[in-house]
Image (cartoon, coloured by chain):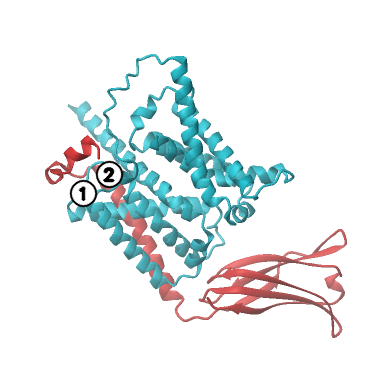
Amino acid sequence: MIQSYRNRRSSSWIAEFDDLIRGASGGFLFGIPLLYTMEVWWIGSFAHPIRLLMAMILTFTIVFMLNRTDGFRKSSNTQASDAVIDSIEAMAIGIICCGLILVLLREITWQTALSETLGKLIYESMPFTLGVALANQFLGGETHSNNSNNPNQKPSDQGRLNATFADIGATLIGAMVIASNIAPTDEVPMLVAAVSGLWLLAVMLISLLISYAIVFQAGFAKQSQRQQQKGIFQRPISETLMSYLVSLFAAAVMLVFFSQLHLNDPWQMWLSYTIILGLPATIGGAAGRLAI
Amino acid sequence: MTELQENSHPHHLAKRPPRSLAEWVSFSIALCIVSVIAALVVYAWASDRDRPAALAVQKTEPIREVNGQFYIPFEIANSGGETVESVQVIAELKIGEEVLESGDLQFDFLSQGEKESGVFIFKRNPSAGQLVLRVSSYKIP
């Protein structure tokens, strides 16, 4: 009796954690291109507080309407009070995740003034919060209907190789789509100037964490299928690492393609440029693997 | 639309379970975060109303000499309430009445309470004369 009560309690915490991760993943998929847009930082920098309040109210209204139909949770909302609660949570997820990325990219530091911090945070978290509320619409909910995928079935070497190629291809396409949107702009050189040393390591770590969360934690469609994917890199951690490398490659290719990197540039520049663009590219790659 | 979603949609009113403790805890944290942000916006609004920009430049670290060039680090701060754009900083080295060397630098944005740093590089030793650092102009966004 006590055991089952404990199980129920811990499972409700896990379910809540999964819901929040799903919301954050949706936010990253939707919001990351705008996080790499300096005009949004600037508009936020000199926005008047009244505009910021209006932006918050507008975000809340849109997210509330989205939550009335389908939010980031497994269970759907129709009661207004539930939608209000979920909308506030979506905004908080948006603010925290955007704050994390803005700190990581050194756009918010201890030297940043309060009004500027608030402006950047609120303007950037707007699309991010919409992404949180759209999380379920994005890539659909987990279906649990994976009967066709028998985990005990031994895959042939050929099938395993094909699955691996399919994974790499999907990651490459997703990463290329996002990277090609950001690579030609001036954001990458600007961010590289501000992000250095240990911060680059932190960017790598966060890239891996977000990629893992989107593919294996968020409960988007095909998650359980992915967990049984029969590629050479079928383990979640090795698949995340592999797809990170593929995304870094896609980022580097796009930077060369748009003449941001040249063969005679120093290797430090190649490294930092690729890691900075690797963050959105990895998110694109994760979305790509879910889409196939 | 998946089968699961189709099934859960028509009767969600009855099906939605009561909020668990976990959901209430995460909601309370979320409410705190959103309220703090909203309160800070209101605070920023109340504190900076109609205060124009006030810009000041000052030299910070000691001037250093590398390969015959003199690096003059400085800091610019906006202690006013208004955010300004395209802030122009000028440095002049005067010996007597004559300006021997000058430099200028532009900052994109300087918001309320913000500090930015920069460096001027001169060929002559600034301690040989009088070094003047000043803000010459800015744009109101």
Q: Which chain does the red colour mark?
A: B
Q: Which residue type carries mark 2? A: Arg
Q: Which residue type carries mark 1? A: Asn
Is the residue under label 2 in contact with that under label 1 (CB below 8 Å)? Answer: yes
Image coordinates of residue A110 in percent, x first then y, are 55, 59
Chain A: drawing colour: cyan
Q: Which residue is mark 2?
A: A73
Is residue B10 shown to the viewer in this render?
yes
User: Secondary structure beneath disc 2?
Assistant: loop
Image coordinates of residue B79 in percent, x first then y, are 56, 75
User: Secondary structure beneath disc 1?
Assistant: loop
Q: Residue at x 29, y 47 (%)?
A: B25
- Closest to the observer, A192 or A37: A37
Labels 1, 2: one chain: yes
Residue A99 drawn above or below residue A225: below
Q: Which mark is residue A77?
A: 1
